[in-house]
Image (cartoon, rainbow, N blue to C red):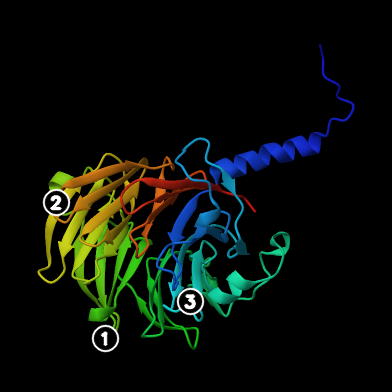
């Protein structure tokens, strides 16, 4: 028996196939918890491969863990932040009413919106995207080549902030880190020395330093008060035993005291005492590490496997919790201890402070 093709719509069928493919390949590159007076987490913000910045209300997501049948959830607010993937999202300011939502992406821009305006917008969801104008819009410089030609605008892969100093720091694709002044929207300093593009950056504000990680396999400490000079190089490839496991420095994180540095490089995770300038532990992982963060005195790491690993500072594995994304690019911790893991397939896991899965959802392509 044959179907009736009288009302067949070829264009609609093709569009549905492309939409399904887009949903399956959507990647969450960063998750972030906004500042809030509520001690319990309710809102999570995502930066994704379609250039979008979206916020989701956790209380509206069905409970339970599912990696294959996670419900697709509609965001409660949406911005089209970038042309091309949005790689990072941060909050500038600690008060809910005056915080800025910052993001960076493949288009070489750093953009910022008022968080309160973003959340309280009355514009219908179908009309959101470019309904709010950014109050910060920074663009990486182009480099001059032969005969006055200009290089492409290098991408921004990560950002860090110093709210008290009125500064934003960016890790760019031209092997440089940039120090931006928020008030003037101009570059204060350029940090040069890496041999390949930068993956990650953190601000060590207590020491007036920034730390960068690069494709060249090293992490570097830079002094903001030393005219942008590199004051220390941490070579993740120095140990012959780990050279096979290590490659680029894909992620770095500081603890709350800013005395300890976690450094993810390929299938190797190392912990450094910055005061003593020494590596105190180094561990091997089954898959490449793609994000790392400190949670109290422990280290959380995610990467190219569906697992969130928890280590102590000496490198011992404390727990390994299954996660929905087959490859995870982001792990973030709320002050309450609740953790968010985001990655491939537009999947996000919310994990309680006790290690149990609170909910899993799939982002909706806008």
**300 and 216: which is toward the camera:** 300
Where in the figure is residue 262, as x and y percent of width and height?
23, 59
Number of disc labels:
3
The residue under the point 37% across, 43% down is 304
Residue holding disc 2: 239
In the displayed structure, would residue 254 be above or below residue 263?
below
In the displayed structure, would residue 7 be above or below residue 52?
above
Let me know if residue 140 appears in the view. Answer: no
Where in the figure is residue 75, as x and y percent of width and height?
60, 57
Indicate the secondary structure of the residue bearing disc 3: loop
Residue at the far top in the pictured view: 1
In the image: residue 278, left or right of residue 299: left
Find the distance from the CA under tag 2 to the CA under tag 3: 45 Å
In the image: residue 142, left or right of residue 73: left
Say which label, 1 or 3, has the lower sequence index.
3
Residue at the far bottom in the pictured view: 184
Density class for disc 2 (Cα within 10 Å; few <14, some 14-19, many ≥20) is: few
**Pointer 1 with pointer 2, Cβ within 8 A:** no
Residue at the far right in the pictured view: 6
Residue 18 quadrant:
top right
Find the distance from the CA under tag 1 to the CA under tag 3: 31 Å
Residue 331 quadrant:
bottom left
Where in the figure is residue 82, as x and y percent of width and height?
58, 64
In the image: residue 220, left or right of residue 68: left
Say which label, 1 or 2, has the lower sequence index.
1
**Which tag is nearer the camera, tag 2 or tag 3?**
3
Indicate the secondary structure of the residue bearing disc 1: loop
Indicate the secondary structure of the residue bearing disc 2: loop
Residue holding disc 1: 225
**Which tag is nearer the camera, tag 1 or tag 3?**
3
Residue holding disc 3: 96
**173 and 213: which is toward the camera:** 213
């Amino acid at each position: 028996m044959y179907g009736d093709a009288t009302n067949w719509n070829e264009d609609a069928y093709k569009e549905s196939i492309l939409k399904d493919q887009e949903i399956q390949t959507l990647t969450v590159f960063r998750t972030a918890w906004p500042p809030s007076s509520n001690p319990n987490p309710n809102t999570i913000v995502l930066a994704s491969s379609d250039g979008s910045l979206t916020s989701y209300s956790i209380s509206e997501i069905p409970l339970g863990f599912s990696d294959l049948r996670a419900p697709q959830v509609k965001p409660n607010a949406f911005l089209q932040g970038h042309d091309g993937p949005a790689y990072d999202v941060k909050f500038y300011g600690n008060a809910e009413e005056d915080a800025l939502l910052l993001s960076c992406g493949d288009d070489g821009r750093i953009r910022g919106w008022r968080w309160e305006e973003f959340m309280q917008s009355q514009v219908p969801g179908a009309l959101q995207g470019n309904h709010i104008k950014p109050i910060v819009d920074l663009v990486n410089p182009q480099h001059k080549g032969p005969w006055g030609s200009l290089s492409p605008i290098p991408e921004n892969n990560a950002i860090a902030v110093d709210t008290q100093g009125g500064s934003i720091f960016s890790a760019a694709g031209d092997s440089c880190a940039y120090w931006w002044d928020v008030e003037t929207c101009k570059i204060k300093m350029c940090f040069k020395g890496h041999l390949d593009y930068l993956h990650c950056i953190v601000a060590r504000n207590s020491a007036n330093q920034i730390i960068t990680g690069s494709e060249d396999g090293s992490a570097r400490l830079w002094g903001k008060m030393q005219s942008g000079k590199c004051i220390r190089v941490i070579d993740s490839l120095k140990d012959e035993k780990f050279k096979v496991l290590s490659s680029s420095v894909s992620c770095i994180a500081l603890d709350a005291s800013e005395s300890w540095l976690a450094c993810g490089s390929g299938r190797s995770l190392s912990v450094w005492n910055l005061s003593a300038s020494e590596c105190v532990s180094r561990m091997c992982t089954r898959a490449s590490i793609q994000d790392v963060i400190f949670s109290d005195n422990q280290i959380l790491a995610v990467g190219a496997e569906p697992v969130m690993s928890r280590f102590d500072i000496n490198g011992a594995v404390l727990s390994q919790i299954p996660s929905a994304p087959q490859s995870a690019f982001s792990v973030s911790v709320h002050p309450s201890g609740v953790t968010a893991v985001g990655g491939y397939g537009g999947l996000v896991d919310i994990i309680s402070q006790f290690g149990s899965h609170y909910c899993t959802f799939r982002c909706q392509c806008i």
